[in-house]
Amino acid sequence: MAKKIKSIVLAITAALLYSSAAVAVENTGRFFPFSARPEKSLYKKGITADVDFFYSSGRNIAQEDRTPLGVGEYAGKYNLRDIVFAMSAKGISTQDVDQLIGNPNVNDPVLFNVHGKVRGGGGVLRYGLAVPGLSMMPVTFGVALPFMYVESDVRYSLDTALFMDRHFKLNPSLLFGGIDANTEEIIQAGFQERLDHARRIAHEAIGLNNNYWAGPGIGDLDVFVRSNLLLDHKFMMRGIDIAIQYGIILPTGVQRANNVVSSIPFMNDGHWSFYVQVAPTFELKQDLKCGFMVRGEHFIAKTKDRQLPIFKESFLYSPLIGSVRVQPGATLIFNSFLALENVYDGLHLQGRYTYKRHKADTWEDMRIDKTIPSYLSRKVTDGAPGGQIITDKEIAGIISAKEYLSKFRSHYITIQLTYDPLEAQQELLLKPKFFASIEAPVFDASRGIVQANQISIGAELHF
């Protein structure tokens, strides 16, 4: 009976691995944590297969020690004036929007806060096959694949403090005449309603009709080979396991959809990548382990149709779609951990810290017809909002600012519990190990990432 169950599990695992439903475990993006579990780098004989289930939720974009941004502002602040200029450059009528904004404000910033939430849940499958016959530096081949269901939404609210400050400067008689709080609140509500109406008209003209996005999907397939250098009772330690892993990330995952502001890529947004990872684990003494992991990942440039900013507007709200070549910046990930094993029979406690840093992405305008200039092909003669005169230095500054927004870094703390029945003298089929963890970002030190908390549970099986 045990052999039949083992055969069935192996067949199901193989079917999942060689289907198209596969994604990477270590996530290099800004939306979900997915930090690596160090025990996955340890050498294990034979075949291992495991599954994790997770739920992640976040609602803000970290800005180090400053006030967080809304989820819809990771590519830049929302300024309706910039969107109106882009519409005009694209040949889209702005008459109704200009009329609602009003002549005194048509050339001034009209800022909105763009809040929202990102939620994701699913599972992660892993499979590893150790090559038999190698003792000193055994080699393991494997793949890793999560699947998930993601929901995200955005909501808009006028930055009334900034707008009202400018409104009173344009109308000083209101201040000198004196108005009570109730009257000021009525004025604010009126502007909020009118300008929100202008925003909705602009979005409809561009084709941004949905503030909610949801769906199941997959991410990017991680195919790797790992070699483990095993040292027994060296340097006054019980054991050392130095894992060196090489991997290729295949772009099988869900990519961001144009003209859907709340759409997010599950992983690398269609880019191939390859990485090198080194993960030494030191068993200092019985039931005490520590270690770290360093990973560098390089992405391959990709050309496809994307929303391309015409000037200062965020690409999320640009009416221009064209061929763009994107070269993502390299990503560095550092992970360190301390594990106390058998704090109770078979129960292990682990704490770890994960640092992730992504360098700037570079965009190149690959359109053949550049009659409508983008911020990348713009010249000083192409104009700017309000007829202002711009310089080459200002254009270079806009390009630099957008590259800066593509950079991010995160600091995460993870607490994990693992239960090994074998350590508790329980002989179970397939020798499972169970784990549960919770991950939380260090908000004040991170920048450009969704402040998402994640919980995970799972089990590892041995064949």
Image (cartoon, rainbow, N blue to C red):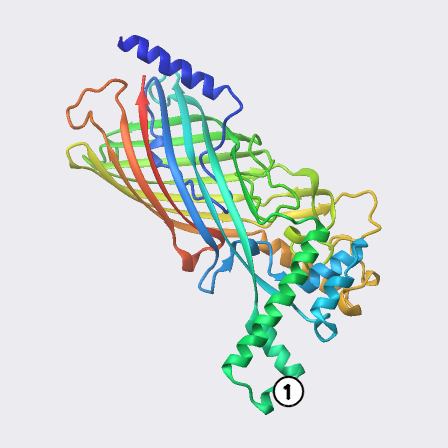
Q: Is residue 322 above or below residue 169?
A: above
* Residue at 42 percent of width and 31 percent of height: 124
* Residue at 54 percent of width and 53 percent of height: 154
Q: Quadrant of the C terminus?
A: top left
Q: Is residue 350 above or below residue 68?
A: above
Q: Nearer the viewer, residue 356 or 102?
A: 102
Work out whether residue 135 can be spotted: yes
Q: Is residue 80 above or below residue 456?
A: below
Q: Secondary structure at mark 1?
A: helix
* Residue at 56 percent of width and 38 percent of height: 268
Mark 1 Cα within 10 Å, few/some/many (few <14, many 20+)? Answer: few
Q: Quadrant of the N terminus?
A: top left
* Residue 123 percent across, percent down from the top left: 41, 32
Question: Residue type at mark 1?
Answer: Pro
Work out whether residue 133 can be spotted: no
Q: Nearer the viewer, residue 363 or 315?
A: 315
* Residue 459 percent across, percent down from the top left: 31, 28
Q: Is residue 375 left or right of residue 266?
A: right
- How many marks the image carries: the answer is 1
Q: Is residue 26 left or right of residue 435?
A: right
To which residue does mark 1 refer?
A: 172
Say which quarter of the image contains residue 104: bottom right
Q: Nearer the viewer, residue 215 or 231?
A: 215
* Residue 244 percent across, percent down from the top left: 42, 31
Q: Is residue 30 above or below residue 420?
A: below
* Residue 315 percent across, percent down from the top left: 66, 52
Q: Is residue 438 left or right of residue 222?
A: left
